[in-house]
Amino acid sequence: MDRVQKAVDLFKSGYNCSQSVAGAFCEALGADFETIMKATEPLGGGLGRMRLTCGAVAGMAVLAGLKYSEAKAGDVETKTLIYKTVREMSDEFKNRNGSIICSELLGSSMPKDNGARAEERTSEFYKKRPCVRCIEDCARIAEKYLMK
């Protein structure tokens, strides 16, 4: 199964947007699936459902760290490479979708309560939201930039 489809399948099975993107690539980048699911869960819904940076974009950024980080304090060269990669990937996402901000991407499908409670996943949930498309785009972009 390709990683784009895996990301969508993870989302449709109940993982959030960030978990879905990161989870589709984590093992290929040498990370443990369960650890990545735990680390990226708070990033869903635009960071804790605050509708800030799209969770799928945040998951994509996590993948750049998995790919390039040496996890060494003061490593300016690696940090610069990661920041450049995250910006390039985010710019490509923004060019495709108009924004990297969750609330802007959701537009009229923004939940009325805007609270911290996650919504039940129904067929209507998937119809009214751009989340699957955003996850697909992030997975394609991650494939292009990180799996060369």
Image (cartoon, rainbow, N blue to C red):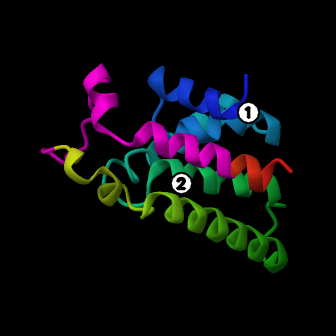
109 falls in the magenta region: no
Q: Residue furthest left?
A: 112
**Rendered image quadrant of residue 71:** bottom right
Q: Which residue is mark 1?
A: 32
Does 124 appear in magenta?
Answer: yes
In the image, the segment drawn in magenta is: 112-141
Image x and y of residue 15, in percent: 48, 29
| Farthest front residue in view | 96
Disc 1 is placed on an element classified as loop
Q: Which residue is mark 2?
A: 57
The reply, left or right, for residue 43 in relation to residue 104 is right
SS at badge 2 = helix
Of the image marks 2 and 1, the number of the one nearer the N terminus: 1
Q: Residues within 10 Å of mark 1 (few under 14, many from 20)?
A: few
Q: Disc 1 residue type?
A: Asp
Asked if residue 122 shows in the view, the reply is no
At x 53% / y 54%, what residue is drawn? 57
**How many numbered circles does the render carry?**
2
Question: Of residues 41 and 114, which is closer to you in this image?
Answer: 114
